[in-house]
Image (cartoon, rainbow, N blue to C red):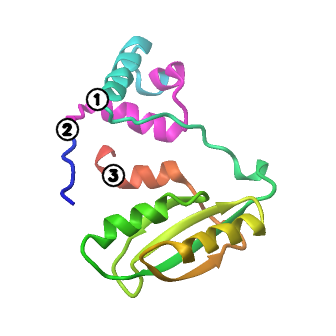
Amino acid sequence: MPSKKKKQIELTPIDKKILNAMFDLKDTNLNLISKKIGLSKSTVHNRIKRLKMSNFFIGIMPLINQEFIQKQITAISLIKAKYGPEYAEEVGKRIANIRGIWAVYFVLGSNDFVALIRAKNKDELEYVVNELTKTEGVERSDTIMVIKILKEDLPDSLRLTFSEFQ
């Protein structure tokens, strides 16, 4: 399956300052961002609007402090798939459509996919694992339940991805 070309947006130094401020602040408050980078609120607003219109931002989501989520299970599933034409895309899509799986990675090594799972309780985790085993193209999965989250920082992972902004 050919990959769809995405229109590339040219980020200006001002755009990069705004993005870094958003990562640092973990907020989209125009007042806070404009104060941090020394630009007017209207400039920040227009730049963020431009990034949204170009689909550079595909949404703005709240980050919830994990301490407020009392009952939650995090698990990681290592998945071996049946090799075949375009299996990465086809099996990957099927895995991604299972409720409770919030990330799917096609990987190199002894496994084909890594799936990250969130569940409210053991029954929900069991549902996800059962759905994985019933998924066409999945040979086996090995699911590991997380005991304690030591670090989970989505904004930091995005910052590392876009280290050119630094």
Q: Quadrant of the N terminus?
A: bottom left
Q: Position of residue 146 (x, y in %)?
A: 67, 73
Which residue is drawn at the image coordinates 36% and 15% (left, top)? 43
- Write down the residue under mark 3: 163
Return the x and y of residue 116 as percentages of the image width and height. Answer: 55, 65
Residue 7: assigned label: 2
- Asked if the magenta segment contains residue 27, the reply would be yes
Residue 138, horizontal then vertical, whole percent? 46, 78
* Label 3: element kind: helix
Mark 3: amino acid: Ser
User: Looking at the image, is mark 3 or mark 2 nearer the viewer?
Assistant: 2
Q: Residues within 10 Å of mark 1 (few under 14, many from 20)?
A: few
Distance CA(mark 2)–CA(mark 1): 8 Å
Does residue 117 appear to the left or right of 70 in the view shown? left
The residue labelled by disc 1 is: 54
Q: Quadrant of residue 41?
A: top left
For label 2, the SS is loop
Residue segment shown in magenta: 8-34
Label 1 and label 3: CA atoms lie apart by 21 Å
Tell me if label 2 and label 1 are in contact, CB under 8 Å.
yes
Q: Nearer the viewer, residue 137 or 164?
A: 137
Q: Earlier in the sequence, mark 2 or mark 1?
A: 2
In the rendered structure, which disc, 3 or 2, sits on the residue that comes first in sequence? 2
Residue furthest bottom in the image = 110
Q: Count the marks.
A: 3
Disc 3 and disc 2: Cα gap in Å? 20 Å
